[in-house]
Image: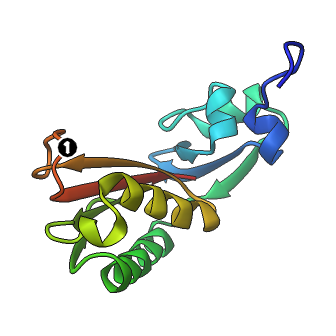
């Protein structure tokens, strides 16, 4: 990259900013936002009307929590077949992997995490992975992996 080159933004890479909304009381509220929408200052919890006023070409879609849960269940089943013997769905956007005794099969924790991230990227997801000895801890020990993704 040259000194005059501009770093790409999500707008350059993906196009239209997108948010998911759900009805809360008498108003529609953002439940999820793509990276481009986040860059523009939109965030979960914001009123959809306010977001539309801020971003003229905003793509607003209804959240589908049941469909999201079904996809998460399918991802968990795939993970149980491919990577680990024990996995569970945790909340609306997380998977817990028990990696006890399995990381050596994938070249260690780092390589395993890169592999899972690449798989999710091919599906169109961005994700964050945390490895901890037990759920809730942040130590590097090959026991549990929490995966959380964003649209």
Tell me the quarter of the image containing the N terminus: top right
Asked if one can make out residue 93 in the rendered structure from this viewpoint, the answer is no
Tell me residue 31's x, y (percent).
50, 47
> Is 81 left, or right, of 134 in this rendering?
right
137 relative to 71 in the view: left or right: left
Q: Residue furthest left?
A: 134
Q: Which one is in front, 41 or 62?
A: 41
Q: Residue furthest bottom?
A: 81
Q: Residue at x 15, y 70 (%)?
A: 101
Q: Rate crowding at label 1 as few (under 14), some (14 to 19) or many (20 or more) other CA atoms within 10 Å.
A: few
| Number of residue marks | 1
Q: Colour scheme of this structure image?
A: rainbow
Q: Is residue 89 above or below residue 16?
A: below
Quadrant of the image occupied by residue 91: bottom left
Rendered image quadrant of residue 113: bottom left
Residue at 84% in and 21% down = 6
Residue at image coords 41%, 82%: 78
Question: As rendered, which of 22 and 138 lies closer to the eye?
Answer: 138
Q: Which residue is mark 1?
A: 140
Kind of element beneath mark 1 = loop
Is residue 40 at all visible to an observer of this figure? yes
Q: Position of residue 99 (x, y in %)?
A: 21, 66
Q: Which residue is at the front of the view, 116 or 47? A: 116
Q: Is residue 62 above or below residue 56?
A: below
Residue under the image location 53 percent in, 67 percent down: 119
Percent across and percent down for residue 85 are 21, 80
Question: Residue at the right extreme?
Answer: 4
**Image coords of residue 121 (percent x, y):** 59, 60
């Amino acid at each position: 990259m040259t000194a005059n080159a501009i770093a790409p933004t999500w707008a350059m890479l993906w196009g239209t900013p997108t948010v998911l909304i759900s009805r809360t009381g008498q108003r529609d509220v953002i439940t999820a936002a793509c990276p481009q929408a986040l860059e523009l200052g939109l965030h979960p919890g914001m009123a959809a009307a306010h977001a539309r006023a801020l971003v003229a070409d905003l793509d607003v879609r209804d959240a589908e929590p049941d469909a999201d849960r079904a996809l998460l269940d399918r991802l968990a089943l795939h993970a149980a077949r491919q990577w680990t013997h024990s996995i569970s769905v945790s909340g609306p956007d997380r998977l817990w992997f028990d990696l006890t005794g399995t990381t050596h099969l994938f070249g260690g924790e780092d390589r395993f995490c890169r592999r899972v991230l690449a798989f999710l990227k091919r599906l169109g997801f961005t994700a964050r992975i945390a490895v901890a000895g037990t759920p809730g801890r942040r130590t590097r020990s090959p026991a549990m992996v929490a995966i959380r993704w964003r649209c």
